[in-house]
Image: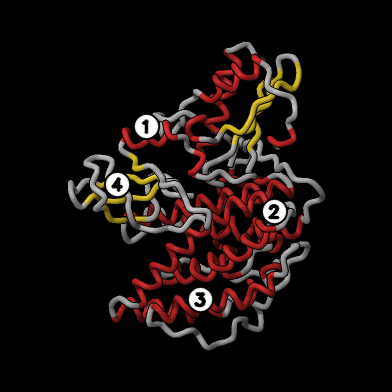
Amino acid sequence: MVTARTPLPTPLEERLLELAGAVPDPELPVVTLAELGVLRGLQMSGPGRVEVELTPTYTGCPAVEAMAADIERVLRDEGIPEVEVRTVLAPAWSTDDITPEGRRKLAEFGVAPPRVSDPGGPVPVSLGIRCPHCGSTDTTLLSRFSSTACKALRRCEACREPFDHFKEL
Amino acid sequence: MKQAPAHVPATAGAVPAAAALALGDDALVLSHRLAEWAGNAPVLEEEVALTNIALDLLGQARFLLSLVGDEDELAYLREERAFRNVQLVEQPNGDFAHTIARQLFFSTYQELLFGRLAAGDGPFAPLAGKAVKEVTYHRDHAEHWTLRLGDGTEESHRRMQTALDALWRYTGELFEPVEGLEVDVTALRDAWLTLITKTVRQATLELPTGPQAGAWTAGAGRQGLHTEPFGRMIAEMQHLHRSHPGASW
């Protein structure tokens, strides 16, 4: 767990974390893993050995394997021969973990970013989602599930374009 | 399911294998049933929705079965009687209304169960805390369709009612005790019934009046006794793996 990690990160760990965090998401390559908030920690566990903690956006997210492979490749290229990527589930990832920069990039890419959830939990409401193309808030839900589990499909009533919405979790 | 990622659960203490198998098999079997809609759903949006739900369930199954042993061996090499899922999840997709009724009954139960598990500190808490948020969307999806079909046309109303009635006899098993589970599932029944009643009434449908268990269904799935369609389902699910042992791509 992150809380159990008392020693401060070394400069090497900081650099490796930055490299791992800069890996693009395999399905939404406009955002990095750090911006998506799925990178939980990185620790040198011995000379030439590093442990990385990754959390999936969704329990069944198939992109986790691609993310792990990309992190391993990037860190090996940096001269770390042994890279172990572990998947952790708790605390559960939330769309609130996406950074402001990540949200901005999603919108620019044409995916309406998730709204910051209220403390009550994920309540699927249909109000106030802005069209990433024209900016109108007059949008309707077409389907709760879209091209990936983390997105819902909506349509803008102003410009008539369909768009993906990264739904709140 | 080749190349399993390091789904190494960071949990302390012994894992109750029977409970992990029961919950894992529920997720695996329902995931497979929902995936059967790929290429067959009435509209594209629903095909995508049902298979997305299937993927969430597959994620649950992989985590839970990995707590017990090798996920591939457990999924593909066990015989029918070694599966511990409730009979509800193995019931065939039927028409779209049957699939929605099955989803409504199961996702409502799973949301309640995972909510309780997430609040505890047992070995299932990390998964339950993660999955309960996804299951909220599954239930939301099932509820909306129950309303649309029940309060839709005469035909959709009739089909939805038929589906609720047909699957009702499998709902009692959801509340049979699960060995090794820290949550008393029997105690979930009242909350489940309240939620189901509310949705069913709102959809202008009738709550089924028949028994919630047949003579042969009371807790049978958890003991490895399954209904006839399950044999055919796992034959298809396991066929490729058994025909090509150890194959990968």
Whether residue B40 is visible to the viewer of this picture, yes or no, is no
Dots 1, 4 in contact, CB < 8 A: no
- On the rendered structure, is A98 left or right of A93? left
Type of amino acid under label 3: Ile
Mark 1 to mark 4: distance in Å? 15 Å
Of the 4 image quadrants, the one containing the C terminus of chain B is top right
**Helix, strand or loop at mark 3:** helix
Q: What is the x, y in percent for residue B90?
A: 56, 65
The residue beneath circle 1 is A105
Type of amino acid under label 2: Phe
In the rendered structure, which disc, 1 or 4, sits on the residue that comes first in sequence?
Answer: 1
For the residues beneath circles 4 and 2, the answer to whether they share a chain is: no
In which quarter of the view is residue B163 placed? Answer: bottom left
Task: Give the number of marks.
Answer: 4
For the residues beneath circles 2 and 1, the answer to whether they share a chain is: no
Mark 3 to mark 2: distance in Å? 25 Å
Of the 4 image quadrants, the one containing the N terminus of chain B is top right
The residue furthest front is: A119
Mark 4 to mark 2: distance in Å? 37 Å
Which of discs 4 and 2 lies nearer the camera? The answer is 4
The residue beneath circle 4 is A130
Mark 2 to mark 1: distance in Å? 35 Å
Type of amino acid under label 4: Arg
Is disc 3 surrounded by few (<14), some (14 to 19) or many (20+) residues within 10 Å? some
Name the residue: 23% across, 49% down.
Answer: A156
**Camera-side residue: A122 or A65?**
A122
In the rendered structure, which disc, 3 or 2, sits on the residue that comes first in sequence?
Answer: 2
Position above or below: B100 against B208:
above
The residue furthest bottom is: B209
The way the protein has been coloured in the rendering is secondary structure
- Mark 2 falls within which chain? B
